[in-house]
Amino acid sequence: MPEQADVLPFSSRHIGPSAAEQQEMLKLIGAASLDELLAQTLPADIRQRRPLDLPPALTETEALAKARAFASRNATMTSMIGQGYYGTVLPPVIQRNLLENPAWYTAYTPYQPEISQGRLEALLNFQTMVADLTGLEVANASLLDEATAAAEAMAMAHRIVNDSRTKFFADHECHPQTLAVLRTRAEALGWQVLVGDPGDLDPAEVFGALFQYPGTYGDICDFREPIAKVKAAKAIAVIAADPLALTLLKPPGELGADIAVGSTQRFGVPMGFGGPHAAYIASKEAYTRALPGRLIGVSVDSRGNRAYRLSLQTREQHIRREKATSNICTAQVLLAVIASMYALYHGPEGLKAIARRVHKLTAMLNSRLAALGYKIGSAAFFDTITVEVGDKREALLEGARKAGINLRNIPSRNGVSCIGISCDETTAPETIDKVLAVFDKDGKRAARSERGESQALPADLTRTTEFLTHRIFHRFRSETELLRYMRALSDRDLALDRSMIPLGSCTMKLNATAEMMPVTWPEFADHHPFVPAAQVRGYLALIAELDDMLRQVTGYDAISFQPNSGAQGEYAGLLAIRAYHRSRGEAQRTICLIPSSAHGTNPASAHMAGMDVVVVRCNGEGNIDIPDLRAKAEANADQLAAIMITYPSTHGVFEENVRTICDIVHQHGGQVYLDGANLNAQVGLARPGDYGADVSHINLHKTFCIPHGGGGPGMGPIGVKAHLAPFLPGHPEWPDGPGIVGPVSAAPFGSASILLISWLYCLMMGGEGLTTATKVAILNANYIACRLGPHFPLLYKGRHGRVAHECIIDLRQLKATSGLGVDDVAKRLIDYGFHAPTMSFPVAGTLMIEPTESESKTELDRFCDAMISIRNEIRAIERGNASRDDNMLRNAPHTVRDLADDQWKHPYTRNEASFPGNMSPARKYWSPVNRIDNTYGDRNLVCSCPPLEHYEAAAE
């Protein structure tokens, strides 16, 4: 093996420009060195004076060896805990060609639908799958986990009912983590969660009710009567349902439910010690506009051909802001796509076969345990039984662990100690024999009994309706066909494996293969989130190391890894601030100051945390207006809870007065929440915890290399100063307990399996590598700003004319001079092979560009050349040398069909349209569709796989 000194550091692979290229770039922008550039960019009073105190950087080989060592410290066990998490078999063709394929995991959220047709089709399949299984008309394109999906359904119910009722009923058979997350969400909003037997429900006093189907202890109940009572009281009925059980049981829609939620984890997605997994939510069509999250719909392009897009602008926090009932930003797209492909792989008959086998094994276990004299909690069940064991509980649990099996510990159900046992797709007859051996301490060796072994489903709740009837779920029975389908879909998309994705505020950087590899190792992938801590020592050790590294980077004193998205991190941080004020007897502090430029999740999160939003103005330079801040802090001094700021600002500059901002808020009794979306400009250079922030969320899917996966997964752990540490979210299923502030996510460590990615990134970069990455991110942004500055106005700059890690170019003047807008530039970039920068945020009519440190000078120049070429195309229109109505921008993107069109009538050539800027045909990315008609899609809403005649009608 070569000596360490002979191996190029990983940072040289992660950082795009070489040392020589960096010098060229510095010369262009007029800075003698990186340090001089940074002195002109960052305020001196926030600069970090000491280097990051992190271990020396490891090579990829060394880091993977360390990951293997940590993996070996995790016990390999069979989980029969259930409680919403199950063993599953991820088909290898999906694992290798989707989950481990950068064409899928490096894609961005499909806000540019023309170049996202592959994943949009896969998500439409997911929505169709969910709608079919639940028997409801509309489903969205995934939520974070089952517990938070239930909380979203509760908020949705309150919004639909829209009256003075503040109580929500939850079935006592709901999963404990779901009940805990419901209570957390309700408490901040002034609502009350009533937990009890559905038979005791008084529907007149609640705005909604949630029922678990099957229940957490395995019982299958008929909820038609309580649902009818809830609806008669003009409240909303919600069912949390297991999708595999729904292949055999009557769907929620047939029981009368208005909304259904659940998790699709057992559709091929590993447990991963808690995630990531795709939750689902479905509803009646009448409530479509109240659905949180993303909704995929069918539209047509400019040729009348079928095309997919995000419908109804369902990211409601960007529209409703402080009036939003949801702050959903990240969806679990990659995991939803996996679940949809699992359904395609098996088809309806295959899914039913898996469900029947799981149920048969459970029934076999039930009958044989009964023969041994054990009392089982329910006569009707699907995959879970609860066994009354009394004082034998601990001994039986330990006996099962010695046999390599985890059972569910239920200290008390109806006053009796019990053990829960759940079967799943991975359960084998041998597993059943091992469990029986544990329970058969007297050697009775209960004989197999056919009685009750094949069926324990209530006859009147057995599913009679078909599902997954669309032909897409019947086409791919051979691996060859499914492989080609996944390849065809990925070929339609433009992801980071093809080109730079220069999205401001989204940090689309390298997701190194070495960082991704351990995520699918069984030692990390196959752990239930509620196993005893002694079985996941490797997991806990790496989480502790990542905790320490993130504290070093941010200057905070404690970290919670529970929030499984950036928006969840915002919410958890604000709940910590709220609880801190209440602990000091200052519950009246409910005002949250938010700059007018803030991301839409900020005011939405504040509302969800029970706070009232007061907007602070920004000045002409894009900075917070200090006099306005001071006035509003003084006016609300007795009620001031917090300010939410983004740093560097959303406008792409380091505000000089950030310490002053923090001081003003602190002087008036408030706390400072610093949004971590732009932390990639600070790592190694400045620490929020040192210059005045009290809490931040840390977007691991931005700064710390977890890939975006087409719009999720994400992770948004929060860092806090010591005084807020007692108010980090707790969890009832972990030794630390529920905590002062309850859980915000279903699992104690959120989507734990992808923490591996950020841990490995930090290990391989080391302190020096992380710091250099930040410097180069700032260099790359300033290089682009300098190259594009002569062609497009740069909207905001710092005092020395520098930007941070992103810049905003202003296109608003183009409407008057050429009739074109930001959309036209974005679509024309597709012809050049690029994803557009962030459009019209934070200022309408602008593009926000963030190159990250991972892009080479070659790629930066290719992007700048494309933008300059587009500007010249616009100049031709401004000068009258090209048509204002029929030009390459207005007609972009151009497709192969355009190239081959015998009826070409445009005043520019096919070559100019399709191969701009002397593009090599060999590298050409072809948009699969022409520009999509958004208005048509909203007026003709189709959110599931439509029949072929729909497309024929659309084409006409």
Image (spheres, rainbow, N blue to C red):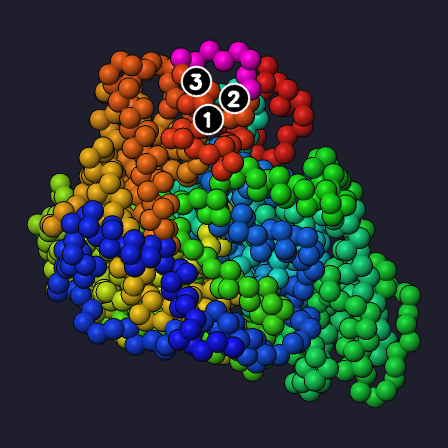
Residue type, mark 3 in image: Thr
Label 1, label 2: how many angstroms apart (C-alpha)? 7 Å
Residue type, mark 1 in image: Ser
Please name whichever residue, 811 or 594, is drawn nearer the observer in this view of the structure.
811
* Mark 3: secondary structure: loop
| Residue assigned mark 1 | 914
| Mark 1 touches mark 2? (CB < 8 Å) | yes
User: Is residue 900 shown in magenta?
Assistant: yes
Residue drawn at x 90%, y 65% is 451
| Residue assigned mark 2 | 899
Badge 1: few (under 14), some or many (20 or more) residues near its Cα, within 10 Å? Answer: many
Is 436 situated above or below 348? below
Residue drawn at x 23%, y 65% is 685
Please report whichever mark, 1 or 3, sits nearer to the chain's N-terminal start.
Answer: 3
Please name whichever residue, 261 or 418, is drawn nearer the observer in this view of the structure.
261
Residue drawn at x 86%, y 64% is 453
The x, y position of residue 53, in whole percent, is: 30, 76
Q: Quadrant of residue 644?
A: bottom left
The x, y position of residue 12, in whole percent, is: 38, 62
Residue 676's mark? none
The x, y position of residue 28, in whole percent, is: 20, 47
Badge 2: few (under 14), some or many (20 or more) residues near its Cα, within 10 Å? Answer: some
The x, y position of residue 821, in whole percent, is: 31, 26
Left or right, 713 with respect to 87, comes to left
Left or right, 453 with respect to 921, comes to right
What segment carries the magenta color?
899-907
| Residue assigned mark 3 | 909
Label 1, label 3: how many angstroms apart (C-alpha)? 9 Å
Q: Main secondary structure of the magenta part?
A: loop
Please report whichever mark, 2 or 3, sits nearer to the chain's N-terminal start.
Answer: 2
Please name whichever residue, 939 or 420, is drawn nearer the observer in this view of the structure.
939
